[in-house]
Amino acid sequence: MLVGYARVSTDDQNLDLQHDALRGVGCEKIYDDRKSGAQADRPGLSTVLEMARHGDTVVVWRLDRLGRSLKRISSAWSRSLKPRGSACAASRR
């Protein structure tokens, strides 16, 4: 299953562009947050990482939606997704 994750940093920003892109690539479920990427407490991301199962792919609009640094993105993938046989992909490069 393709599971989407979208994030904007402030309440003033809009998630529509990311939601449209994620639906466009076939995401069946989309979770989101309205929090800075610097904040570790992001309930939408936590839900995605907890619910991803073997064969699922977590899709983001751009990789920077997962975190501000490659280290943080890599850590999320290696500790949460990889052990369950899940993958991560970006819909935009």
Image: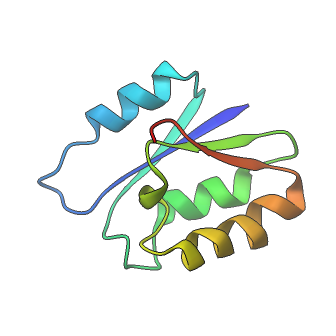
Above or below: residue 85 compared with residue 16? below
Expressed as whole percent of the image width and height from the top left, the position of residue 90 reads 54, 43
Q: Nearer the viewer, residue 24 or 46?
A: 24
Above or below: residue 71 compared with residue 53? below
Residue 9: image quadrant is: bottom left
Residue 11: image quadrant is: bottom left
- Left-right relation of 57 to 36: right
Residue occupying the far front of the picture = 93
Q: Which residue is at a point 48% across and 24% down the rendered structure image?
A: 23
Q: Which residue is at a point 49% across and 57% down the rendered structure image?
A: 44
Above or below: residue 91 compared with residue 51? above
Expressed as whole percent of the image width and height from the top left, the position of residue 77 reads 70, 64
The way the protein has been coloured in the rendering is: rainbow
- Left-right relation of 80 to 26: right
Q: Nearer the viewer, residue 85 or 44?
A: 85
Numbered circles on residues, count: 0
Q: Which residue is at a point 44% across and 42% down the rendered structure image?
A: 61
- Left-right relation of 65 to 29: left
Expressed as whole percent of the image width and height from the top left, the position of residue 71 reads 58, 79
User: Quick one: quadrant of the N terminus?
Assistant: top right
Expressed as whole percent of the image width and height from the top left, the position of residue 79 reads 77, 73
Residue 73: image quadrant is: bottom right
